[in-house]
Image: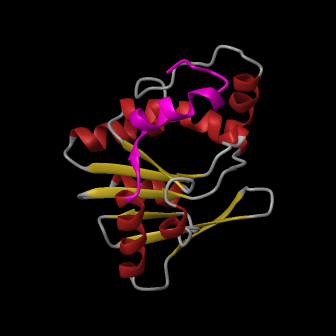
Amino acid sequence: MDELTQLLRQIERSAFRLETRSEYNAPGEAALFRAFFEGKALPPRNPETDPWLRMTADSVNAGRIWRRVHVVQRPLSRYLQFELIGYLGNQLAGEDIRIASRDDQPGPLDELNLDFWMLDDGTVFVMHYDQDNRLVDIEPATTNADAFRKQRDLALAHSIPLADYLPTARDELLRSSW
């Protein structure tokens, strides 16, 4: 991820992230994930407290666009409940967070099943995960970026802003701190 982070620091126009999984097993999130479900107070997550969000905010303030679409299906997994709340910090940094629900758009969204980053509308990095949902590899796409642009555009066309999605999922969220 260090190489990708360096490339994200150098984008000229935009960064787009497509997330399609209902579970991610990121070692750096394990303690926060556990604390979230134990009802413990979580540390503030904003550009002043999180280096990733600082990088994002600095990039957005320099005029670059950061967008993310997470494709979800109900019922929300425990991880998605945690992540949806965590996205509030990304919004504070200026990232446009959107949710595409397979429940609302089952047909068109079926083809979205690969996580990737797209930088400046052309450079694509595909994320690979193991059976335990751990990130094992990030590799440059070996195919034409047009297919990834179509996936991006499909995800954006069938998504809504996080602020509009959260009220629809309120009954599933263990915390209503948003």
Task: Pick out the residue farthest to the bottom.
Answer: 143
13 with respect to 103 (left or right): left
135 with respect to 2 (left or right): right
The colour scheme used here is secondary structure
Q: Nearest the camera: 166 or 21?
A: 166
Residue 72 image offset from top left, x and y in percent: 58, 51
87 with respect to 57 (left or right): right
Identify the residue at image location x=66%, y=51%.
22
Above or below 6: residue 97 = above
Above or below 171: residue 157 = below
* Quarter of image, res 15: bottom left
Q: Nearest the camera: 147 or 139?
A: 147
- Which span of residues is magenta-colored? 158-178
Whether residue 138 appears in magenta in the rendering, the answer is no
Task: Pick out the residue farthest to the left.
Answer: 63
Above or below 121: residue 29 = above
Q: Nearest the camera: 65 or 10?
A: 65
